[in-house]
Image: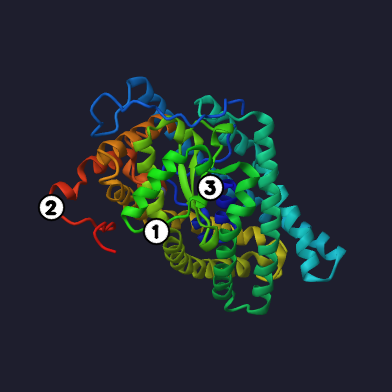
Amino acid sequence: MMKICLWLTASVVLILVCMAAPGWGATPRIAQQANQPKAENVAPAEPRLPPPPDRYELSPQKRAEAIAYSHIRYALYFAGVALALLIYFVLWRGGVAVAFRNWARRLSRRHFLQCLVFAPLFFVTVELVEFPFDFYSDYIVEHRFGLSSEGLGSWAADWGKSLVLLVIVGTFIVWIFYAIVRRSPRRWWFYFWAATIPIILFLMFIEPYVVEPLFFKFTPLQASDPALVAQIEKMLHRAHLRIPPSRILEMNASSKTKTLNAYVSGLGESKRVVVWDTTLKKLTDDETLLVLGHETGHYVLHHILKEFVLDELISLGFIALGFVAVKRLIRRFGDRTGIEGEGDLASFPLMLLVLTALSFFASPAVNAVSRHYEHQADQFALEVTHDVVPDPNAAEAWAFQILGEQDLSDPDPNPFIVFWLYSHPPIDQRIRFAMSYHPWTEGKPMQFVHPGEP
Ligand SMILES: [Zn+2]
């Protein structure tokens, strides 16, 4: 699920970044593993005994593991971008895309049918070349650090499903993209940007119905833990907020991963809050309520839509830059590489090369927007659970501590890495904030939740 989001982000438009739903922990890692016993919704019954952590603390061994794991993930991110750039470069300069375009032309004169041949060939080639990297990154590394519970068969099946999704969505976007470029050689960058707005909104809307069920099972939390849902209702009622219980779902993440998370996805009628069964199993009810408070914050503060608007604005500037770069590159190298112009399908790897480079440089801006809303959601969780949970500060701090230990979050990330890659504030900062934000003890008003008002 995230694989296709990330791929589309890098390849089709920068803004598809926002399809990655705002989660509770770090960006959800979907491609993972089986044989993990089904988590039962038996949360630890006893409250945590030691005082709540006021910072993120790990045993020396865990700390070393978390640092090693995080560093591998950072390296894999940069290596992944470099690999994608290299693949697009070779497909462009090596004449592979020109060959694919020639085959497509031989089979049909119609643009749409040419896309039907060219795009699947192109996407399957890229994915096959990237396969060893994906396997190492998503399977080997996750297993080595004990974060995965997914078997090889299940992982391979997910890889195949992602590829099918990519081919379907990608072919459609290639068709639209080149139809626009051919019709408007000077302003395609703007029209294509405008066209991505309804396309992305539509993809965000159908994602919970079409994409997510391909990888996981979703059941109403109401069915497995009505008591918890009753508490959630109470928490929301206090803030005059409402999310129908049918929109609060449990996901069987334990079939593939040992990590914890929760997230919101969808848009309008498809908008919902999802909590992983791994989270329900590891956290106490109070801690789970804080997690759900965070997700309901995303939900009621309309973060998905707001992030989408901001990311679209960021991407407009980058797409305009991409237009200029692509034009110059084709003018300079077009003859030598057999590309006949921007409207030629053979220019696709060059387009992706430029877009991947630009989306890489857009990453700090997109992540800064995300970290801002994630911080808001952390604050919202404390406000909405105040008076519902005996000690929301302790519960949130504990929830982050457990999340960090379980997901091997970096205890001390480099500020540059945070600036470039982090969609959420570092876990240590989140714990410190959780323990320090309590306007109710200082007689100050809360920012987002106003229990007294109708
Ligand atoms: Zn979040």
As measured in the structure, the alpha-carbon distance from the residue carrying label 3 to the one carrying label 2 is: 49 Å
| The residue at label 3 has a CB less than 8 Å from ligand 1 | no
Task: Give the mark nearer the N terminus: 1 vs 2.
Answer: 1
Colour theme: rainbow
Residue 358, above or below 440 = below
As measured in the structure, the alpha-carbon distance from the residue carrying label 3 to the one carrying label 1 is: 34 Å
Q: Residue at x 26, y 36 (%)?
A: 394
Dot 1 crowding, Cα within 10 Å, few <14, some 14–19, many 20+: some
Q: Does residue 342 show up?
A: yes
Task: Give the mark nearer the N terminus: 3 vs 2.
Answer: 3
Q: Does residue 423 show up?
A: no
Q: Residue at x 67, y 69 (%)?
A: 176
Disc 2 residue type? Gly
Is label 1 in contact with label 2 (beta carbons under 8 Å)?
A: no
**Front residue of 148 and 49:** 49
As measured in the structure, the alpha-carbon distance from the residue carrying label 1 to the one carrying label 2 is: 25 Å
Residue 81, which numbered label? 3
**Front residue of 357 and 415:** 415
Disc 3 residue type? Val
Q: Quadrant of residue 114?
A: bottom right
Q: Secondary structure at mark 2?
A: loop
- Say which of marks 3 and 2 sits in front: 2
Q: Can you identify the residue that label 1 sits on? A: 300
Residue with the most extreme left position: 442
Q: Residue 68's spot in the image, x, y percent?
A: 42, 28
Q: Secondary structure at mark 1?
A: helix
Q: Residue at x 32, y 35 (%)?
A: 412
- Tell me the quadrant of the picture where the C terminus can be found: bottom left
Q: Can you identify the residue that label 2 sits on? A: 443
